[in-house]
Structures are given as structure tokens and as C-alpha cells.
Image: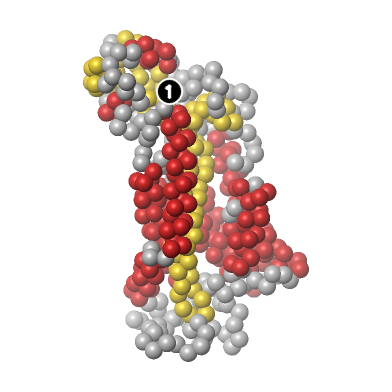
Amino acid sequence: MIPGGFPFEWALGAVFTSVVFALFHPLFWLVVVLVALQYRRIARERANFFGARGNSVLAETFTATAYGFGGGLIGGGLILLTGITIHGSGLLYLLPVAILLMLINPRLLCFAYGGGVLAVCHLLFGFPDISIPTVMALVAILHFVESILILVSGHLGAVPAYIRLPGERMVGGFTLQKFWPIPIVALTIATGTPAPGMELVSMPEWWPLIKPDVPGGTGTVVFAMMTLVAGLGYADIATSHAPADKARISALYLAGYSVTLFALAVLATSGGGAAWLAALFAPLGHELIIHISKHIELHGRPLFVPHPAGLMVLDVMPRSPAWRAGVRSGDVVVEINGLEVRNRADMHLVLRQPGLKEVGYLHRGTHFRRDNVRLRDGEPFGVMPVPEGSEQVYLELDGTPP
């Protein structure tokens, strides 16, 4: 280790060991069960549109857990790198406040709002006794981890939906809903005498970046790692972007919010106006990115609307005949067995009888392709068309946050 440098190799090993240890904690598996229940609900929503089951709930939960494990490694590494401790973090108050806010509106179950409320109360009344820089830094790191998870997996399992925009226009779109169980490393200040055999590692002088309020400063303080379990969630709607593109946009805005909030948290160590900026930006900045996301969908050009060349496809059931024929979301089915397909009624007419079907379609609306697929008796073709305007079941998208 270079004197005064950060012990990266030790840090990576320590974070990995602590995160793996969380996998054996009952609380982690309780969060996994809660996440599985959410994916079961999403699977039911998807089945309601297709009339058949889609992806396995077990597979969805396993994938989310794997991504959550990776997110825990990233978050734990950032916490250890910056030296953020739970000392003064207000965790004792943060969860109850978040639950109270959830009773007002479910989307307020987010530490950005709970942390902002606690920080403002502390500035106004001196209660609760928390460290605003620490609270804001933890909120920033958790949201940065969420932005990475959204980037790599926020689009997976998107649920197709018919959505009515302001002005009564009906379009196709997707609801993006993801949940991840997160085992994450936190730092705390060790008390008493270090146990025999405990590994002590010297840290550079600049560390921790946000110093906890402890008597005598942090020069001789011993920090210990502990493992916490959290759950992160993401919800969004995509009408003018494909789900993967919308997830990338959301991840970019959320990462920008996280970096800005962390910078304000560091500035807040000096107190004064910077503490107020951090306290107010946490909830208001989060609201801003939600409104930006909504604005993009309200004013962008809808992708999933009727196409003049044929039947525009909103989504395709995995492993269905349409899927095996190569049809994907955004394609346009032009003909089946040489018969022209213009709408849902045309498609149902040519698919009444099972057997070999020759499907001609425009891939991404431009390149014509043709493939054969066999439709078994009673098997759904697996295509969900875009709405044609007479649908009775839909989501309504207005200007208010989701």
C-alpha cells in the first residue's frame, strides 16, 4: 500500500466479503420475498394483456437479486471510498418518516423525500439530531446505485399498456417497473477495544470525505463495516421511446441528480446556506426529474400508434409463434399467408385456423422480412397490437407525477 493512498485492493475484498455475508441474513431473504411478490403482480398484469403467462416470476426474481447483488457491491464501494458512516445518518427516523409519507402518496416512499423532511426539520427546530451532510450523501449514493440498475436492467420485463394522453388520444406504451433487493455495506464508528485478530487498515488523511461529528476528530477513530439490507424500486412510463431508451434517459437524469446532491452534501459540511441547499434539493430535485420524465412522454412523438403499412406491434409474447417468426416490438405485420393485414380484425381472421403461417412484416418499420411458423391448435399468436382507439381498458397519463 502506498503511504497516504487509498487501499483499493483491501476495500474491494472487504466490501465483497460483507455483501456475500448479507446473503445468509434472514432479512435479506425477506426482502427477496417481497420483491418476488411485486414481480408476481407484474406477471399478472402482463398476462391480463396477452391472455397467457409470460416470463417466470422465479426467473425475474433471480435476475433482480443478481443485479441487486452487483448494486450492493457498487454502493458499498462508494460508501467505503467516501467514508460515509451511519453515525448521524438519521436511519432511526428515516424509515418511519418515509412510511408516513407513503400514507400520503405511495410514490413518496423514497429516502429523497424522507431525508429532505428530516433535514428541514433539523434546520428549523434542531430536531432530530442528525448530520445533514451524512443523510444527503447516503441518499445520493443509494440513488446513484439505482441509476446504474435502471441503466442495465430498468427496461427488462416492461409491461405493455394502452395509454390515454391528454386530449383523449390513445397510444401504446410500456410501464417500466423494477425492484431490487440490495445488500449494502455501511460504516459505523467502533466502540471499545478492537477484538483480537481484527484487521486494522490505515486510511489516507483526506478520508473520510464527510467527517462524522466525534470528539477529538477522526484521526484516531476506528471505523467498522456492517451490512444493511435495502430494497430499491423504479417505476416509469414509455410512450415516445422504446423501454431501453427510456431507461437510459431516466438513468442519466437520476445519476445527474445523485452527483449534484452528493456535491451539495460535501458543501453542507460547512453549514449555513449550503445545508439548506442540500436539504431542499433532495426532494425538489427528485420531483424535477419526475416532471422532466413526464414532460418527455407528454410532448414526444408517440412510437406505438397505427401504421399505414399494416398492423403495428406493441409487444410480443416470448416463445410465442410470432416471437419464433422474428416479430418484435415496433415491427409492422403486413401480411400473413399472402393476405393483407391492416388491423386486429384482419389478423384474427387469417389466424382462425392452426397450421403453417407465412408472416411478412417490416422490421423496425423499414426492412421487409418473411418467415414461416407453425401455429398449434388453441395457441395464441402472441402479438399485442397498438391501440386502435376503441379500447375500454387503459392507463391515463396526465401532467401530474406518477
Question: In this orientation, does residue 351 appear?
Answer: yes
Instruction: Report which residue position mark 1 lands on.
Output: 385
Relative depth, front residue between 81 and 60: 60
Relative depth, front residue between 234 and 248: 234
As displayed, is residue 147 above or below residue 273? above
Identify the image's colour scheme: rainbow, by chain, secondary structure or one colour: secondary structure
Q: Quadrant of the N terminus?
A: bottom left
Classed neighbour count for the residue bearing mark 1: other residues with Cα under 10 Å, few (<14), some (14–19), many (≥20): many
As displayed, is residue 192 above or below residue 133? below
Q: Residue at x 42, y 87 (%)?
A: 195
Question: In this orientation, does residue 299 appear?
Answer: no
Q: Residue at x 51, y 76 (%)?
A: 188
Q: Residue at x 44, y 81 (%)?
A: 203
Measured as percent of width and height from the top left, residue 137 is found at 55, 65
Measured as percent of width and height from the top left, residue 255 is found at 50, 54
Residue 364 falls in image quadrant = top left
Measured as percent of width and height from the top left, residue 378 is found at 32, 20
Q: Label 1 amino acid?
A: Pro
- Mark 1: secondary structure: strand
Q: Residue at x 45, y 69 (%)?
A: 227
As displayed, is residue 184 above or below residue 175? below
- In the current view of this chain or complex, which residue is farthest to the right? 125
Q: Quadrant of the C terminus?
A: top right
